[in-house]
Image (tube, grey):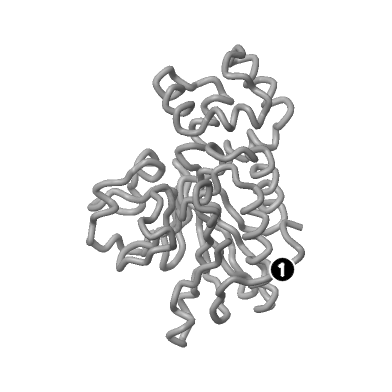
Amino acid sequence: MCGSRCRTWFGRSAFRPHRARHCGFEDWKKKDCPVTEDRIVYAIGDIHGMAGLLRNLLERIEAHAIQRQAVPQLVFLGDLVDRGHENVAVLDTVCDCLDRYEGSRLILGNHDEYFLKFLDGTLDAESRGNWHTYGGLETLRSYGVDPDDDEKTAAARVRERYPHHYRLLLEAVPCVDLDRFFLVHAGVRPGVPLNAQAPQDLRWIREPFLSSEASFGKTVVHGHTITKSGRPEVFPNRVAIDTGAYASGHLTAAVLPSPTAEAAADRDIAFLST
């Protein structure tokens, strides 16, 4: 199990999940992620190599779902790796969760993209420098790679030893599109329809997304930019759940309400956190 000893933080009332679809680069609306009435969707923010926090949060998610006689459906918003030192354990845990909980998804974050490019040999010099500066060295060391090692040889060794991690990143999606919510890593570009967003923006954008007061058509749930308060923040057009786990010790999940919820409390987004 991803978590067996369970306790909640501050859950709300039961939520009935909604039908979801995930969007790929070529098949934006072709593949469905069926969600049944006994499932609850949990969006999990940036983990950044903090496996202990992830296990703690998963215990709380499982307790929340058990209390409501539901099964978790997890959407990881990306940035599994870098900064923290438990990157291998994080990817092992995410692989287990995606196998265990039907319909769960990983959205590729910008840090995950760097690691994937390292693994498949497409990391250019500028990206390599940025990656190493912003936490990539911790990921390499987690996998037993010295930065001075020959990169192609080291990447091949990691792929051979951890093929499930490579496959996890290869199969990650740029977004998950729900009835009321649009889940991404970083955000969306204002003025561009959700089904026409560039994957680069979905993984990297900050402005003009963060300061936009425009409606995006759906509420965007995202990570990537650490909230100023260090807690999840709710705006009229977006919900930010990157609470800086690697620095603060607080990893957050948003519990997404069903569009069919009738009670006002059931229409609110709830949060679980470490």
Choose top left, top right, bottom left or bottom right for residue 241.
bottom left
Position in image of residue 21 (x %, y %): 50, 58
Q: Secondary structure at mark 1?
A: loop
Q: Is residue 212 left or right of residue 102?
A: left
Q: Is residue 28 left or right of residue 5?
A: left
Question: Residue, x 34% and y 54% (percent of image)?
Answer: 194
How many discs appear? 1
Position in image of residue 29 (x %, y %): 46, 53
Up-down relation of residue 126 to residue 84 (above or below): above
Crowding around mark 1 (Cα neighbors within 10 Å: few <14, some 14 to 19, many 20+) is some
Position in image of residue 14 (x %, y %): 57, 80
Up-down relation of residue 160 to residue 60 (above or below): above
The residue that label 1 is drawn on is 6
Question: Residue, x 51% and y 27% (percent of image)?
Answer: 117
Q: Is residue 89 left or right of residue 42?
A: right
- Amino acid carrying label 1: it is Cys
Choose top left, top right, bottom left or bottom right for residue 274.
bottom right
Choose top left, top right, bottom left or bottom right for residue 168.
top right
Name the residue at the bottom extreme.
263
Up-down relation of residue 142 to residue 65 (above or below): above
Position in image of residue 125 (x %, y %): 43, 17
Name the residue at the front extreme.
248
Question: Residue, x 32% and y 66% (percent of image)?
Answer: 235
Q: Is residue 232 left or right of residue 140?
A: left
